[in-house]
Image (spheres, helix red, strand yellow):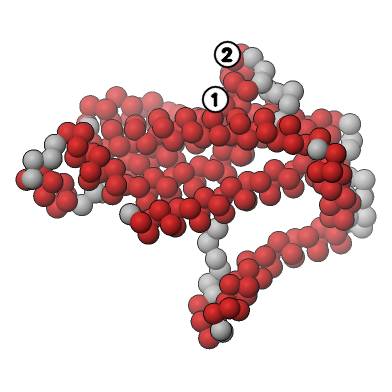
Amino acid sequence: MAHADTGSLGVLPRRFQHATRLIVDWIPLAIVVVLWEFASGTAVPADVLPSPVTVSVQIADLLATGEIFSHLFVSLFRFGVGLGLSIAVGVVLGIGMARSAPIENFFDVFLSMLYPIPKVALVPLAMLWLGVGTGPAVLVVFLACLLPIIMNSYNAAGDVDQNLVWSAKMMGTEGWELLRKVVIPATIPHILTGIRQAIPIAFIALVSAELVASYEGIGYLILEAGQVGNYSLMFANIVVISAVAYAFVTGFEIARDRVVVWT
C-alpha cells in the first residue's frame, strides 16, 4: 500500500523514519476504531454493532479454538486457484492481443461485453453450471481478476520500446524468442501492477461467492453468523478476512518492489 506523503520525514534520523511512516499510515484506521467504539452502544445498539473490544475477544476465541482455520484454508485455496488461473490466462491473452491484431480483434468484443458486468451477478449462473462449493467461487474470482491483468499486460506489451524490438530483430531474434527475451521482461512491472490490482478484487469476489454458493469458507461463516444474529462473530470473521487480504497485498507489494528492482 502506498505510503502517505512523508517527504518531510527526511529530516529525522533514519532509524525513526520507518516507525514514523507506520504511525502515519495507521492513523486513519485508529480513527475509525475510535469512532466505532464510540458509536457502539450509543448511536447504534451494541448488539447490532459490537464494540471493537467485543470483536477482538471473539477473534481471540476463534483463533484459540482453531474453528476458523479450516474455513480460511478453503477460502485461500479458492482464492489461489482463481487468481492463478486469471494470471495464466490474462498475461498470455493480454500480450497476445497486443502483439497480434487477429487475436485482439477476436477477443475485443467479448472482453468489452464482459467488463461492465458486475462479477457478483454471475454467481447464480456459476451455481447453475457448477453447483455449490469451490467451483462457483473459483470461476467468479477468475472472471473478476481477468480484466485488470489482461489490460495491464496488453498496455505493457503494446508500449514496449520499439528500439529494443528492432535491435533484437536486427540480431536475428524473432517469434517466441523475441517475446521471451524482450517483450515479456519489459512487461513484468506492469503485469505485477495488474496482479496487485487483482488481489483485493479477488477477495471481494471470493467472499461474495461464498455468501451465496458455499457451505464452507469465510464468506459462509459471515453469512451464518449474521443469520443467527451473532453479530460479534460476523464482524470477527470480516476483520479476519480483511486482515488476511491486507497481508497478501502488503506482502505482494514488497515482493513486487524487489522484482521490479531486479528487472
**To which residue does mark 1 refer?**
139
Q: Secondary structure at mark 1?
A: helix
Give percent across and percent down for residue 196.
Answer: 49, 47
- The reply, left or right, for residue 91 in relation to residue 183 is right
Q: Residue 105 is drawn in which quadrant?
A: top left
Neighbor class of circle 2 (other Cα within 10 Å; few <14, some 14-19, many 20+) is few
> Between 57 and 129, which is closer to the camera in this rendering?
57
**To which residue does mark 2 refer?**
129
> Between 14 and 49, which is closer to the camera in this rendering?
14
| Discs 1, 2 touching: Cβ within 8 Å | yes
Q: State whether residue 177 appears in this view.
A: yes
> Between 197 and 186, which is closer to the camera in this rendering?
186
Q: Residue at x 93, y 55 (%)?
A: 41
Q: Which mark is residue 147?
A: none
Residue 99 against residue 5 in the figure, above or below: above
Q: Residue at x 37, y 51 (%)?
A: 189
Q: Residue at x 84, y 43 (%)?
A: 64
Q: Earlier in the sequence, mark 1 or mark 2?
A: 2
Q: Residue 75 is drawn in which quadrant?
A: top right
Q: Residue 134 is drawn in which quadrant?
A: top right
Q: Amino acid at mark 2?
A: Trp
Quadrant that contains the N terminus: bottom right
Quadrant that contains the C terminus: bottom left
Give percent across and percent down for residue 187.
Answer: 32, 47
Give percent across and percent down for residue 18.
Answer: 58, 72
- The reply, left or right, for residue 258 in relation to residue 212 is left
Q: Residue at x 44, y 35 (%)?
A: 87
Q: CA separation, marks 1 and 2?
A: 10 Å
Neighbor class of circle 1 (other Cα within 10 Å; few <14, some 14-19, many 20+) is many
